[in-house]
Image: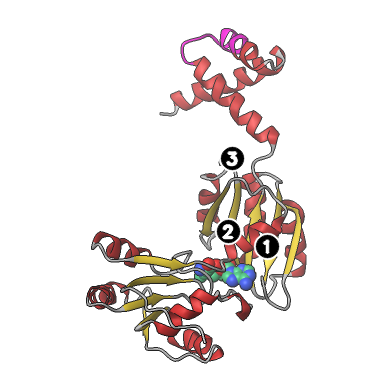
Amino acid sequence: MTPVKILAPGLYIVATPIGNLGDLTMRGRDILATADAIACEDTRVTGKLLSAFGLKRPLIAYNDHNADKLRPKLMEMIAGGQVVALVSDAGTPLISDPGYKLVRDCVAAGLTVTTAPGASAVLAALVLAGLPTDRFLFAGFLPPKSAARRVALGELTAVPASLVFYESGPRLAASLADMADMLGDREAAVARELTKLFEEVRRGTLDSLAAHYGEAGGPKGEIVVVIGPPLARETAAADLDAALRRALSGNSTRDAAALVAGETGLPRKQVYARALALAQEIKTGDASD
Ligand code: SAM
């Protein structure tokens, strides 16, 4: 029999499966088996997980409603020598789930904080999307209303990386349409029910995915949307605009265009046309201030 390891007092962030129970790590299981208490979002959900593994430990609900009140108590337990595990309903705690302030405060108080990492829908979707993985930005859930969602997307247009969002079935088609409008018709993937029986990854451009889900309706289950980095021509256009704006402050339109055409090697005519448009935009902007 494997001897049970005695854990040092501390906060243990334990990832739990996002669907397939086999994805709980052995170390995660050992920590859950021996923790003095397990802080969890919903005691019923975590109770089920524990019973699937034949475990029974004291559960403490720690969620958005009671976190401020409960945090000092959990910290007192740890300071008093106890092992407290933190789990969420599924996946990695703190990732669009509670726990950040508990970690922050435990760190500030000099308490031990460690983790048994494991499943998270972000990485599971990213590795299946077939899109660049060298740089990615996880942006959690977008706002539910279109106007706010478009503002949030607008802040991400120039990020030179793949983008990852959590999304719900009923909002998927509208979100994809906003993404296509605000980010351009980039390559994307909709990953659904990851690690579960009906796991599905649908790949395509944002326009085609928006059209598909607009017709088919919102799919059931849990969803992650992964979007590829800006198209080369969008980056080039953004770079050209930035260079022209710099050159236009302090130079005539003609000189600015000549400077930037020299710097970039782009055709003079194209750069001059864009310089004229930008100079007009700048003038109109100044006039309306
Ligand atoms: N902390 C979790 C993690 O590490 O993945 C995420 C919690 S967040 C409240 C729940 C969202 O994660 C779901 O709405 C969905 O967007 C995504 N998600 C969770 N499990 C998933 C799965 N099996 N397949 C696809 N998306 C999933």
Measured in 3D between alpha carbons, the distance from the residue under mark 2 to the one under mark 1, in whole angstroms, is 14 Å
| Residue contact between numbered discs 2 and 1, judged by CB atoms under 8 Å | no
Q: Main secondary structure of the magenta part?
A: helix
Indicate which disc residue 56 carries: none
Measured in 3D between alpha carbons, the distance from the residue under mark 3 to the one under mark 2, in whole angstroms, is 16 Å
The correct choice, above or below, for 185 with respect to 258 in the image is below
251 on left or right of 75: right
| Residue contact between numbered discs 1 and 3, judged by CB atoms under 8 Å | no
Q: Nearer the viewer, residue 175 or 117?
A: 117
The correct choice, above or below, for 127 with respect to 97 in the image is above
* First in residue order: circle 3 vs circle 2: 3
Amino acid type, residue under disc 1 in the picture? Ala
Q: Nearer the viewer, residue 145 or 22?
A: 22
Q: Is mark 2 within 8 Å of ligand 1?
A: yes
Q: Nearer the viewer, residue 25 or 267?
A: 25
Using a 10 Å C-alpha cutoff, classify the residue at mark 2 as few (fewer than 14 neighbours), some (14 to 19) or many (20 or more): some
Amino acid type, residue under disc 2 in the picture? Phe
183 on left or right of 154: right
Disc 3 target residue: 160
x, y percent for residue 173:
67, 62
Q: Which residues are magenta?
A: 249-259
x, y percent for residue 101:
33, 64
> Residue at coordinates 72% horizontally, 72% vertically from top-left?
199
Ligand 1 visible in quadrant: bottom right
Q: Secondary structure at mark 1?
A: helix
The correct choice, above or below, for 109 with respect to 183 in the image is below
Locate the C terminus by quadrant: top left
Indicate which disc residue 173 carries: 1
Disc 2 target residue: 165
Q: Nearer the viewer, mark 1 or mark 3?
A: 3
